[in-house]
Image (spheres, rainbow, N blue to C red):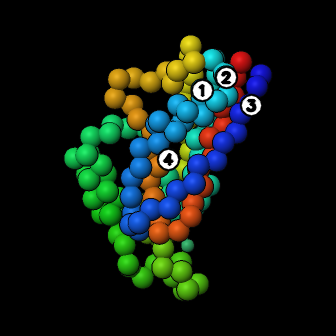
């Protein structure tokens, strides 16, 4: 079994943003030379998420609104007693999850028609990293 590791850097202009990183993961897969296996994609942060879903812009707005309803921004979370202001971002990260596994078959992401990989930033405007680890033969 071979392993290939790559780090993506992200720096969003907005506090919250949704970035389609499917192409970056495909590039890492090509670089790895692996044709059968799986890829771990992980946000290396506790205020961001990685998920698989549709790239439809209306749905992305729906996801953002839904997360805002569950974990509203700028509320007096206990976490803020430490001087932090990103309590909502931690909670949003828990809802989306921070990592995914993608199957690889015949040198391609073995996805359904509409599946895309998203990095969800909930506390941006600074440098963040995403880990891509390709495993297989
Ligand atoms: Zn925090």
Q: Which residue is label 4 attached to?
A: 50
Residue that carries the numbered disc 2 in the rendered image: 33
Q: Is mark 1 on a helix, strand or loop?
A: helix
Task: Tell me what residue is drawn at x 39 percent, y 31 percent.
Answer: 115
Query: Is residue 50 in view?
Result: yes
Residue beneath disc 1: 30
Q: Do the residues labelled 2 and 1 touch (CB within 8 Å)?
A: yes
Of circles 4 and 2, which is in front? 2
User: Which circle, 3 or 2, is nearer the viewer?
Assistant: 2
| For residue 21, side relative to residue 66 (left or right) | right
Query: Badge 1, how many Cα within 10 Å: few under 14, some, many 20+?
Result: some
Mark in the foreground, 1 or 3? 1
Q: Tell me the element at label 3.
A: strand
Count residues near mark 2 (Cα–Cα under 10 Å), then give few for <14, some for 14-19, many for 20+.
some
Distance in Å between CA atoms under marks 1 and 4: 21 Å
Q: How far apart are marks 3 and 2 (CA)?
A: 10 Å
Q: Residues within 10 Å of mark 3 (few under 14, many from 20)?
A: some
Q: Is mark 4 within 8 Å of ligand 1?
A: no
Q: Earlier in the sequence, mark 1 or mark 3?
A: 3
Mark 1 and ligand 1: say if the CB distance to the nearest ligand atom is below 8 Å: no
Residue 122: name its quadrant: bottom left
Q: Is mark 2 on a helix, strand or loop?
A: loop
> Tag 4, which secondary structure?
strand
């Amino acid at each position: 079994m071979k392993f290939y590791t790559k780090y993506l850097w992200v720096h969003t202009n907005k506090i919250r943003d949704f970035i389609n990183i499917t192409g970056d993961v495909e590039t890492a897969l090509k670089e790895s030379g692996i044709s059968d296996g799986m890829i771990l994609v992980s946000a290396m942060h506790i205020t961001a998420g990685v998920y698989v879903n549709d790239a439809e812009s209306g749905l992305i707005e729906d996801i953002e609104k839904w997360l805002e309803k569950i974990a509203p921004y700028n509320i007096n979370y206990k976490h803020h007693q430490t001087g932090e202001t990103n309590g909502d971002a931690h909670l949003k990260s828990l809802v989306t999850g921070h990592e995914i596994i993608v199957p690889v078959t015949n040198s391609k992401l073995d996805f359904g028609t509409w599946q895309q990989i998203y990095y969800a930033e909930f506390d941006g405007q600074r440098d963040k990293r995403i880990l891509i680890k390709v495993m297989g033969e």
